[in-house]
Image (cartoon, rainbow, N blue to C red):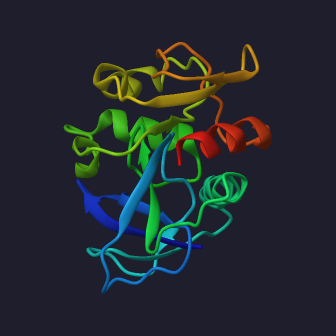
Amino acid sequence: MEYVATFEEVEGVLCRFDTRIYLGSYNPSKDSICVGAMVGKNPGSAMPTRTGELAPLELRGDKMLPTVGNRFTEAYALANKQVPPNAFVRIWNLFYVCGKDMDRAAKVASQMAHPPICESEKGTVPFVWFGWGGNNAMLNPFKQRFVERRYSPAFFYDHTCGKVITRTPEQSEFAKHTQGMPAAPIRKHLAMVV
């Protein structure tokens, strides 16, 4: 697996856009294929190797990206399908401000004149997996643009009822983040949609 993204400074704040988890080797000279998207909270602790261009990133303890990649590769195996060459999972975030301390990063993002979004959110993807956590007064306003888009197909693991729900979650629903999420239901659902 390889992880790439574009890091840029916006209003003096480091932001991460166009984050991709390549499920095999990344070959920048060949066309890439997006096999799905996942919506998380914020970019977290992963940092750039260079800025201003799509480039490998340093995980620095970030566990979400490898977890998402692992669920996808396991799903392809479960479905008895080969991962397409140069296939990647797109990662979208509620906000794109980098920071290991999510509360601090959310505060910075909410104080920006125009919190930036990733341009790829405007495109199409085969499906969207939501993992933005539970009802949170600080994060709920950032969820609204995703709720309004009503991506389809979409799914999330509802922490409250303990099962996969096949639609876009509402702001107040507990779309479980990958941390502590059971792998089997996600793997099984992904195997049906990859």
Residue lying farthest front?
A: 80
Nearest the viewer among 131 and 156 is: 156
In this rendering, would 96 be left or right of 130? left
How many marks the image carries: the answer is 0
Quarter of the image for residue 67 reads bottom right
Q: Residue at x 62, y 53 (%)?
A: 68
Nearest the viewer among 44 and 108 is: 44
Q: Is residue 147 above or below residue 61?
A: above
Q: Residue at x 46, y 30 (%)?
A: 154
Q: Residue at x 29, y 25 (%)?
A: 149
Q: Residue 31: image x %, image y %?
A: 30, 75
Q: Residue at x 20, y 38 (%)?
A: 114
Q: Residue 191: image x %, image y %?
A: 63, 46
In this rendering, would 142 be left or right of 103? left
Q: Residue 64: image x %, image y %?
A: 63, 53
Image quarter hosting the N terminus? bottom right
Q: Is residue 135 above or below residue 75?
A: above
Quarter of the image for residue 109 reads top left
Q: Is residue 165 above or below residue 11?
A: above
Q: Residue 94: image x %, image y %?
A: 42, 37
